[in-house]
Amino acid sequence: MRVVVVRHHAIDDAGFIADAFRARGAELAVHQFPAGGPLPSLDGVDHVVVLGAAWSVYEERIRDWIGAELDWLRAADAAGIPVLGICFGAQALTAALGGQVEAAPRSEVGWTTVQTLEPELIEPGPWLEFHHDRCLPPPTARVLARNELCAQAFTIGPHLAVQFHPEVDAAQLGRWLADGGKAEAQRAGQDPDKLIAQTEAEEQQAALRADRLVAVALRLAKPAAAA
């Protein structure tokens, strides 16, 4: 199984999600976009993972490259290649496939339990949140989990989109906080030191939750693979 991981910042990685794919024999290729050049060919790719970003998909400052990413996601959809979109990745998938993205009424930062509509697919968590936008999924989407702020997980065909960050460990969170995220966390009412400590405490269970989420993503992708 060949998996392409798209990240938008050098400090990001697929973390627990990458571990879960590798545990199933996957070969991962990581591409940073846009800094690493054009998005790779989808030939021979079995799954795509799109990670988060500090931007919003509707921001003027990324207009010179976001169109290319949305077109690439549409090409993956047309080719029947399933996508796992995480946070910004979920928002890009939403925008590419007929939904909308808007600023949320408030930022959501920290470990959060979600209301799951299909617990056999998305468990309540807690899941790590770090975002200030929300998805308005297209009519074809099936919402799997939500809270009072937004849709937290949904499918669009064979694709799985999650607003939370199943991939993140304390080390990656620490990089985010050091790279400007500390102020955002504080504005959202979080003590950054306590958030790091809580993330460290959650790591073992978070890795297991991420593993189960990848199993769900692969299960949802099976109809596409069989088509």
Image (spheres, rainbow, N blue to C red):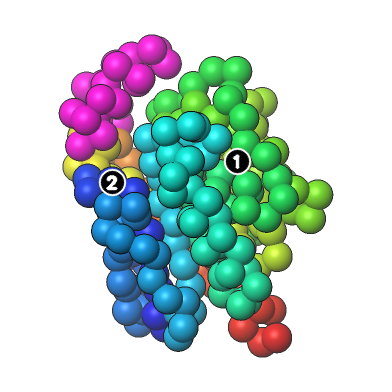
Residue at left 34%, top 52%? Answer: 34
Q: Nearer the viewer, residue 116 or 12?
A: 12
Identify the mark at residue 10; answer none if there is no mark.
none
* Residue interval drawn in magenta: 175-198
Residue most extreme to the right: 139
Mark nearer the viewer, 1 or 2? 2
Question: Magenta stretch containing residue 190, yes or no?
Answer: yes
Counting every numbered tag in the picture gives 2
Where is residue 157 shown, x and y percent of the image?
A: 70, 65
x, y percent for residue 148: 66, 26
Query: Are circles 1 and 2 on residues that touch, CB within 8 Å?
Result: no
Q: Is residue 161 above or below residue 24?
A: above
Q: Which residue is mark 1?
A: 152
What's the residue at 65%, 44% (across, down)?
A: 145
Q: Position of residue 36 (x, y in %)?
A: 27, 58
| Image quarter of the N terminus | bottom left
Q: Residue furthest front?
A: 64
Per the model, the C-alpha gap separating discs 1 and 2 is 23 Å
From this view, report whether residue 170 is shown above or below residue 121.
above
Main SS category, magenta section: helix
User: Which residue is at a point 25% across and 25% down the rendered structure image?
Assistant: 180
Which is nearer the eye, 197 or 192? 192
Observer able to see residue 129: no
Residue identified by numbered label 2:
9
Sort mark 1 into few (<14), some (14-19) or many (20+) by Cα contacts within 10 Å.
Answer: many
- Quadrant holding the C terminus: bottom right
| In front of the other: 57 or 61 | 61
The residue under label 1 is which amino acid type? Gln
Q: In the picture provided, is 157 more to the left or to the right than 2?
A: right
Residue 103 image position (x, y, % from top left): 58, 25
Element type at mark 2: loop
* Amino acid type at image mark 2: His
